Image (cartoon, helix red, strand yellow):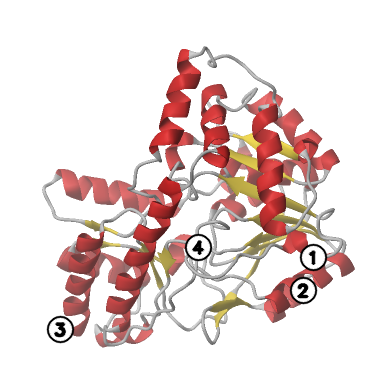
Amino acid sequence: MTLAGRIDNLGTEKAFAVADEALALIKSGATLYPFHIGDINLPTPENIVRAAERAIRDGKTGYCSNYGLGELRELLAEDVNAARGTAYTADNVAVQPGGKPVIGKFLLALMNPGDEVLFPNPGFPIYESLIGFYGGRPVPYGYLEGERNFVIDIGRLKRSLTPKTRLLILNDLHNPTGAEASPQELEEIAEIADRHDLAVLCDEAYFDLRYEGRSRSLTSLPGMRDRCVILFTFSKRFAMTGWRLGAAIGPRDVIDTMARLNVNDESCTNHFVQWAGVEALRGPRDGRRRLIRILKERRDRAAEILNAIRGVRCYRPDATFYLYPNVTDAMRAKGLTDYEAFRRAALEATGVSFCTRLHFGGQLPEETERYIRIAYGGIDLDRIVRGLNLLKDYLES
């Protein structure tokens, strides 16, 4: 068989390649400290698990609406409205089998071949992959080091606009940097979207996974609700990464189109898993509070150790479960300039497995600093301390 030519435009999520490498090391008997994958090693809250089990016993194992369960759609609209000050109804919600399908269906619904799409780089690699796969032209914008955290390079974003720019992807709060847009940044993005008539995918997968402060959404700004589609996922907020449950929330005509795509792609999202989602939104929040408490403790300790390493500096974001330390001086001190050589040398010397900046898109021409991503959602606190202290010893030796 001859594969279709479009497959050449399909990328991948490179963090999974690191995960495969890590699994092979574990099978060989090596001690590994896994900071590479954006997963959570904490259990899904028990009330959510019981709800899924109850739904299976009650026969919720067949097809349901391609839009999703009515109860779940109503709860999602209420939840989003309460946090963002919006006025969505169930008609603005299409349930999805995870967050990733929202990206693809947003592009299929709104992007024509040849359209240019602004996307964050570094960023979730699936954006660039699917833009190219579906015939669009991916155009990156970057991030800069700010006073307290990374900030969007608004200047580069503006310079990248052309008459062919149709869509903008905004990942706020951001993977891999942990950045969150300030009110001023959101106002600037809203002005850009309005002036250039852009539709915006608001990837808010980490909106509710925060330790201090309150998250903000572009959809809260005047006129933006009609331009935006929200990517909502249960994965991070409720430790449900493998359950594959999410939603697209946006203008009715776009949501109707995405629900039509649902019919063609998967018919509907898993029936009994949706009832687990109903319980997640409607039931007690004790499990979620425990999740936040544990992740905050991990963040604080990891950031403390990283900032104590000579040649490393690291922000402490108020949300996500990622740290994105600058390792420029540490790499230089080890005589290494190549990202992959540095990653492998650190892995072999310490067992610490992490992703580098290059796992989140090609380096932009103006970039001179070097970064790695430390994901602490899938590793216990005691192993965080042991692993990062081994990394400290290696980098300072």
The residue carrying mark 4 is: 210
- The alpha-carbon separation of the residues under discs 2 and 1 comes to 8 Å
Q: Position of residue 64 (x, y in %)?
A: 65, 19
Callout 2: helix, strand or loop?
helix
382 left or right, relative to 207: left
Which amino acid is tagged 1?
Answer: Leu
Mark 3 in CB contact with mark 2 (< 8 angstroms): no
Q: Amino acid at mark 2?
A: Glu
**Mark 1 touches mark 4? (CB < 8 Å):** no
Element class at badge 1? loop
Residue under label 1: 221
**Do the residues bearing badges 2 and 1 touch, measured as CB atoms within 8 Å?**
yes
* Image quarter of the C terminus: bottom left
**Among numbered discs 2 and 1, the one appearing first in the sequence:** 2
Question: Around disc 2, counting alpha carbons within 10 Å, would you say few (fewer than 14), some (14 to 19), or many (20 or more)?
Answer: some
Q: Residue at x 27, y 84 (%)?
A: 308
Pointer 3 or 4: first along the chain: 4
Earlier sequence position, callout 2 versus callout 4: 2
Rendered position, 281 above or below 132: above
Question: In front of the other: label 3 or label 1?
Answer: 1
Q: Residues within 10 Å of mark 1 (few under 14, many from 20)?
A: some
Q: Nearer the viewer, residue 20 or 275?
A: 275
What residue sits right under mark 3 in the picture? 397
In front: 5, or 306? 306
Whether residue 15 is visible:
yes
Q: Determine the image quadrant of residue 223.
A: bottom right
Check disc 4 and report its element: helix, strand or loop: loop
Residue at x 57%, y 63% (from the top left corner) = 173
Q: Is residue 133 visible?
A: no
Residue behind mark 2: 187
Find residue 263 and report its horizontal and vertical position in percent.
Answer: 70, 24
